[in-house]
Image (cartoon, helix red, strand yellow):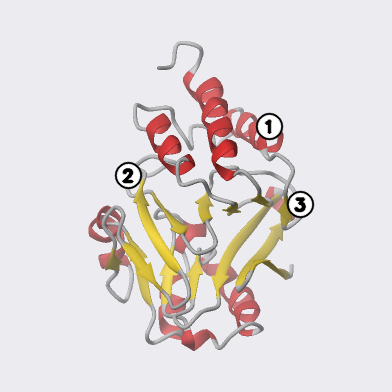
């Protein structure tokens, strides 16, 4: 298995590892800036491969920030390996993530971001949005890179297969099929329709992202707000049923 590197926006790189056994891409995103940021660490067993890919773009020891949406192995499973490799790096997450998981699990305490806090990395600014249970997890949140209008989507828009790095075609058919497939298998109920779901997706859509950085599958360029509103209806249809509010 090899990590494929693609620049999906100026200084923003998608590092993708396709795992045939699960027919899924695992994507990390590296921002090259004065204070470099890695979003998603990958699974712990992936660390050597992802580190080698990062080293093709910058010195891994120069990483300053490590972000993720929620506490899960593919989101932050190798965080301690990264903290050891990058002495100045700090995890970035919301208060729930820090209190419940990271400040005990990780070898370095987190930079806690309250809702709407902004992290400046140099030329780029990341705004934090708390989205409990969206896509899943009490601690879930998203980062929105304001300079290039890129939303880091985590497991939203999940797609199966080995697909192109970036597309301007709709992701909805792929995402709908993947959600249906997951609902029928052992990983069902990874996401749920709750009173928080529609407002959270609408809040993300209102940011009007021009790019969606997707963890599993192709990233998207275009009307990200419209795509998120369409995804909201797919979630309502599959997870909530016809009587959903």
| CB atoms of marks 3 and 2 within 8 Å | no
Q: Residues within 10 Å of mark 3 (few under 14, many from 20)?
A: some
Location of residue 231 in the rendering, given as x and y in whole percent from the top left corner: 56, 33
The image's mark for residue 226 is none
- The residues tagged by marks 3 and 2 sit, at their Cα atoms, a distance apart of 30 Å
- Alpha-carbon neighbours of circle 1 within 10 Å: few (<14), some, or many (≥20)? some
Q: Position of residue 228 (x, y in %)?
A: 54, 38
Residue holding disc 1: 177
Rendered view: 57 above or below 12: below
Identify the residue shown where x is 25% and y is 57%: 95
Q: Earlier in the sequence, mark 2 or mark 1?
A: 2
Q: What kind of element bears circle 1?
A: helix
Kindly report the distance in space between the C-alpha atoms of the residues bearing marks 1 and 3. 14 Å
Q: Is residue 134 left or right of residue 172?
A: left
Q: Position of residue 51 (x, y in %)?
A: 58, 79
Q: Residue at x 44, y 78 (%)?
A: 122
Work out whether residue 5 or residue 224 is closer to the camera in this orientation and state it.
224
**Residue topped by disc 2:** 138
Residue at label 3? 163
Which mark sits nearer the N-terminus, 1 or 3?
3
Residue drawn at (77%, 54%) of the image: 164
Q: Are marks 1 and 3 in contact (CB under 8 Å)?
A: no
Q: Quadrant of residue 175?
A: top right
Task: Say which quadrant the N terminus sits in.
Answer: bottom right
**Above or below: residue 47 compared with residue 154:** below
Looking at marks 3 and 2 on the same chain, the residue that comes earlier in the sequence is marked by 2
Work out whether residue 38 or residue 228 is closer to the camera in this orientation and state it. Answer: 228
Which quarter of the rendered picture does the C terminus lie within?
A: top left
Q: In this image, 99 relative to 188: left or right?
A: left
Where residue 97 sits: x, y (%)?
30, 56
Choose between 162 and 209: the one closer to the eye: 209
Camera-side residue of 52 and 114: 114
């Amino acid at each position: 298995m090899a990590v494929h590197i693609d620049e999906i926006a100026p200084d923003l790189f998608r590092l993708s590892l396709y795992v045939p056994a699960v027919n899924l891409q695992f994507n990390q995103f590296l921002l090259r800036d004065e204070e470099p940021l890695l979003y998603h660490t990958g699974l712990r067993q992936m660390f050597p491969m992802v580190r080698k890919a990062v080293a093709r773009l910058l010195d891994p020891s120069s990483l300053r920030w490590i972000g993720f949406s929620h506490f899960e192995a593919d989101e932050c499973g190798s965080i301690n390996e990264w903290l050891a490799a990058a002495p100045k790096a700090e995890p970035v997450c919301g208060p729930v993530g820090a209190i419940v998981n990271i400040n005990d699990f990780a070898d370095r305490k987190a930079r806690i971001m309250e809702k709407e806090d902004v992290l400046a990395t140099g030329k780029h600014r990341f705004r934090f949005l708390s989205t409990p249970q969206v896509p899943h997890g009490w601690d879930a949140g998203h980062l929105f890179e304001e300079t290039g209008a890129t939303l880091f989507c985590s497991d939203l828009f999940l797609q199966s297969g080995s697909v192109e790095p970036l597309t301007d075609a709709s992701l909805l058919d792929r995402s709908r099929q993947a959600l249906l497939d997951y609902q029928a298998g052992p990983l069902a109920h990874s996401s749920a329709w709750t009173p928080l779901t529609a407002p959270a997706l609408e809040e993300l859509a209102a940011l009007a992202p021009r790019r969606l950085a997707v963890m599993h599958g192709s990233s998207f360029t275009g009307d990200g707000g419209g795509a998120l509103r369409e995804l909201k209806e797919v979630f309502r249809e599959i997870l909530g049923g016809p009587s959903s509010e």
